[in-house]
Structure formats: structure tokens, C-alpha cells
Image (cartoon, rainbow, N blue to C red):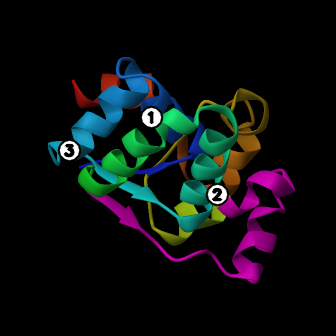
Amino acid sequence: MIRAFIDASVLFAATYSPTGTARDLINLGLRQQIALVISPHVTEEVRRNLSNKYPERLPTFELILANANFEEIDKPTHEEVLQAADYTALKDAPIVAAAVKAKCSHLVTYDRKHLLDRPEVAEGSCLEIVTPADVLDQQQ
């Protein structure tokens, strides 16, 4: 079974739109066909962004959190974040460090600039950095 760390961009998209690959990924978690992992950093970021841009979607976000069988891990330590910052942008280091700490096989994101198009991040973290569509393809 794929053990996937879900970053804020994916969780935000799944909350904002009832259709699409981000929501399909969450539905795999609902059906326990994939292990979905998040950290407090992710939930805080999504909650903050929704509050600022789409506050009417907050109840949907809370519903997803309550039902999608997420495993929420502890925040990575300062040292773990600094280690991830050796091969990724500092702003993304808490996410990468959390995915590594959680022993995930995949980091699922829409962030092309800092994660998807940066092979050094995948190499340094030993994570498969993919989009929701990539995970859905692997499930077929």
C-alpha cells in the first residue's frame, strides 16, 4: 500500500473542489486503499489559506479531516527540518522533513517550482515526489 504524505496544496485543492485528482486521492484514503499522512504544519497552512480566501469551505475541510483516515504525525524537530533544508527550499523543509519522519514512500504535491521539478529533493529525501494524478495512475 502506498504511504503518501499530502502537502497543503493538495489538501487545499481537495477541499476547494469536489471533483479532480486531489479529491480522488482523498477518496482513496476514505476507502483505505492508500495511507494518507499529514502534519500539523499542513493543516495549519490549509486552514489559514481557506480562512483568508474561501472561509465558506472551512466546514468541508473539517469534514475531510474527520473522515479521510489521515494519520497526523508530530511536527519534525528543528534538526530534522535543517537536515531537509540541505536539499530543499527552507519554506518546504518542514513538509519534506515530516514526510521523511513519517516513513512515507510518496510526497504528493502540486508545487512544481520547489518540489516536483527538483530531482535533488527526491534524491535527498528518498521520496517519490508526485502529483495526485501520478498516485492514481499507480493505483490502477
Q: How many numbered marks, from 0 up?
A: 3
Q: Residues within 10 Å of mark 1 (few under 14, many from 20)?
A: many
Q: Amino acid at mark 3?
A: Leu
The numbered mark, 2 or 1, whose residue comes first in the sequence reads: 1
Q: Nearer the viewer, mark 2 or mark 1?
A: 1
Q: Residues within 10 Å of mark 3 (few under 14, many from 20)?
A: some
Mark linked to residue 95: 2
Q: Nearer the viewer, mark 2 or mark 3?
A: 3
At mark 3, the secondary structure is helix
- Per the image, the residue denoted by label 3 is 30
User: Where residue 88 sits: x, y (%)?
Assistant: 79, 52
Mark linked to residue 15: 1
Mark linked to residue 41: none
Question: At x 35% / y 22%, what residue is drawn?
Answer: 18
User: Where residue 139 sits: x, y (%)?
Assistant: 25, 30
Q: Amino acid at mark 1?
A: Thr
